[in-house]
Image (spheres, rainbow, N blue to C red):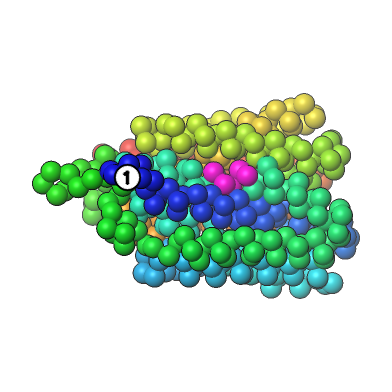
Amino acid sequence: MRADGGVFYGWRVVAVCFVVASFAWGLGLFGSSVYLQAVTTAHRWAVAEVASAITLFFLVSAAVQRFVGRSIDRWGPRPVLATGTVSIATGVALIGQVSAPWQLYPCFVLVGIGWSALSTTGISATVAPWFERHQGRSITLAIMGASVGAIAGVPLLLAALDRLGLGAGLAMAGLVAAAVLLPLVGWVLRFRGPADLGQRRDGDAPPPGGLTPLVHPPVATPANRRVLLWSAAAGFALGLTVQIGFITHHLALAEPLLGAAGAGLLISATGGTAFAGRLVLARIVDRVDPRRLAAGIMLLQTGALAAIALWPGAGVLIAASLVYGYGIGQVTTLGPIVVRREFGATAFGVTYGSAATVIQFVSALGPALFGVLRDAFGGYGPVLGAAALCTTVGAVVLTLGRRTSSA
């Protein structure tokens, strides 16, 4: 609410970013598992070959993360998110038209450009200037659309492919994304922050004395900012490498045990627990240390991955996937929140963009690593064991980074 009782415009920005996240994660991160399964089935190409093309999507996204953050800081979110929408919609549509493996690569370049603009960096940089007291909650609610992308996006993509075929189904998905997102981005995101409307962050009235007290003053200083930024980047990079690999291969991992329909339902249910994780996070994030919370959740994910590796049955797969999904909902969101809390709102886009570049470059290896190791070992058990170890190391790096910077 604004000081005068009206609805603060920043919450409209959050609502649009929620819709953007729904499409970005549905067609990007979670959609990658559908593309992997659908393309390999339709063309009989090797899993590792298609997974390598999907890896390019994440590498391209990594290469432009800092540019996305800097561009939003400089020109505002509207041109950046509009460009991202056109790029991801075109790339998804073209995936269905390929006839040779090499043709997947330019398609996923377009998807990667779109994903970089419409996912965590683009959304958090769009929302960050509007809030101070609700900095964590606003980013969490905006990115919560990612769970909708998993819950609804994967089944809708699968249904479209089943009903229309690979080419027409993906063309329809791209067209719908452009038709929904371009008007919303063009109209609502025309303002860069509350100052454009003569308002203050959170819609608050001007305080006595004219200075707004910070609820969570930034802890970064010239002496510790490097340790804080790069420990966050390294910790989240390790955790998200595993998350992206797991999400990309989740359908292929589950289908032998659950069938195609059951695997699709499990992915949706995993998205549901991710949504629940973000709901919990929205309630608590402005009252806790987000770095410590992220480390704890990553250790929970370690247990889920180890359980699937050690006891590869349908029941364990279902239960552990749901637990892991709860962590996806929080870890994916906590990266920008940690940087926002520790560094403040000033030049947030370029600051988080720098960390996101590292996170994306490292985590882009996830789909290919899962694919290569799966083909090498003939199954996912050893892959998941290595993934559990990687996630544990990420949690340790996050914890030690804060302790070292405070020493």
Task: In this rendered view, identify the residue nearer to me: 181 or 143.
Answer: 181
Name above or below for residue 13 compared with residue 116.
above
Q: Quadrant of residue 59?
A: bottom right
User: In the shown orientation, is residue 334 left or right of residue 309?
Assistant: left
Name above or below for residue 133 compared with residue 311.
below
**Where is residue 391 shown, x and y percent of the image?**
56, 40
The residue beneath circle 1 is 2
Quadrant location of the C terminus?
top left
Amino acid identity at mark 1: Arg
User: In the shown orientation, is residue 156 left or right of residue 335?
Assistant: right
Q: Quadrant of residue 195?
A: bottom left
Q: Residue at x 77, y 38 (%)?
A: 265
The residue segment tinted magenta is 144-148
Q: Quick check: can you spot residue 320?
A: yes
Is 261 in the magenta? no
Q: Main secondary structure of the magenta part?
A: helix
Q: Quadrant of residue 74?
A: bottom left
Q: Residue at x 70, y 65 (%)?
A: 175
Q: Residue at x 43, y 48 (%)?
A: 11
**Where is residue 182 shown, x and y percent of the image?**
57, 65
Is 146 in the magenta? yes
Name the outermost residue toward the front.
Answer: 5
Task: In this rendered view, identify the residue nearer to me: 37 or 7.
Answer: 7
**Where is residue 43 shown, x and y percent of the image?**
88, 63
Q: Secondary structure at mark 1?
A: loop
Task: In this rendered view, identify the residue nearer to me: 295 or 379.
Answer: 295
